[in-house]
Amino acid sequence: MLHPLSFLGCECDLVTVALVVVLVVVLLLAYMGVFQAVRFVPASIPKCQIAGFTHIGPYQNIGSVFEKVEKIQKELKLEHSFFCGLYHDDPSVTAKDKLRAFAGMAFEKPLDEETLTTLKEKGMRVRHETDEIPCYTTYFPFRNVLSYMLGPMLVYPRINKKSCPGMDCSCEEEGGIMEIYHDDFIQFMIPRVGGKLFPLKDL
């Protein structure tokens, strides 16, 4: 026959397990950057050329487009500066099947004409940005593929006139937000007035 107090031992074990699980989850979320403060500071997108592909549709489906970009980069052994995504529409007001984006690789050192021709032959569109683009920027740690989802979920809701005074994300003709993908972090670039991001007509 079980001693009445033995149930207390079971309850204590369950509480201990629950506390350990909660602690592990909290530590995991902290590691992923969920509790990191989002602060925007003035910055600028450097002069560069961006080669890539246009994507129309749900933003979460843009991964296959980046795979095409990376495949070409490796095939041609291009020394790019960074991979980036341009997101032109607000998914809260634009239908998913009409969202406009651009997945590409950027080069701060100008590409030669032969390489430009090769990229265009492979169906890539190339954008030349001759001036630095004034913007606000913030960073989110990159840990694994989940960071591509968590970063925007935490950063985008905090983009407003108070956190980014003078921002200009209008998407009528040009504009949007740029994400730059580094090895250890994702950088979000929000254009300021006078700092339009890569006109859509050029993409």
Image (cartoon, helix red, strand yellow):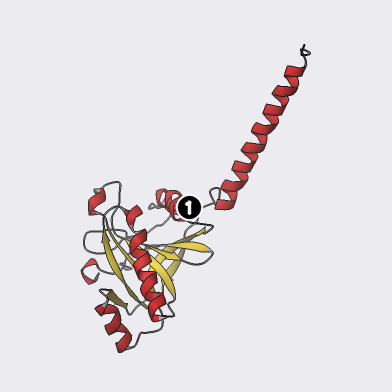
**Place of residue 162 in the rendered image (x, y in percent of width and height, measured from the top left):** 41, 52
Work out whether 37 lies above or below 68.
above
Q: Position of residue 125 (x, y in %)?
A: 26, 74
Q: Amino acid at mark 1?
A: Leu
Q: Is residue 167 visible?
A: no
Residue at horizontal 30%, vertical 46%? Answer: 92
Foreground residue among 43 and 31: 31
Q: Position of residue 76 (x, y in %)?
A: 38, 80
Height in image: 43 above or below 108? above
Q: Residue at x 75, y 22 (%)?
A: 9
**Which of these two is toward me, 83 or 192?**
83
Q: Identify the residue at image location x=67%, y=27%.
A: 14
Q: Quadrant of residue 12?
A: top right
The N terminus, quarter of image: top right
The quarter of the rendered structure image containing the C terminus is bottom left
Instruction: Find disc 1 in the rendering and name its residue.
Output: 146
Res 148 seen here: yes
Between 56 and 33, the one nearer to me in the picture: 56
The local secondary structure at tag 1 comes to: loop
Looking at the picture, does residue 85 appear above or below residue 60? below
Q: Is residue 147 left or right of residue 56?
A: right
Give the side of residue 88 with respect to residue 160, left or right. left
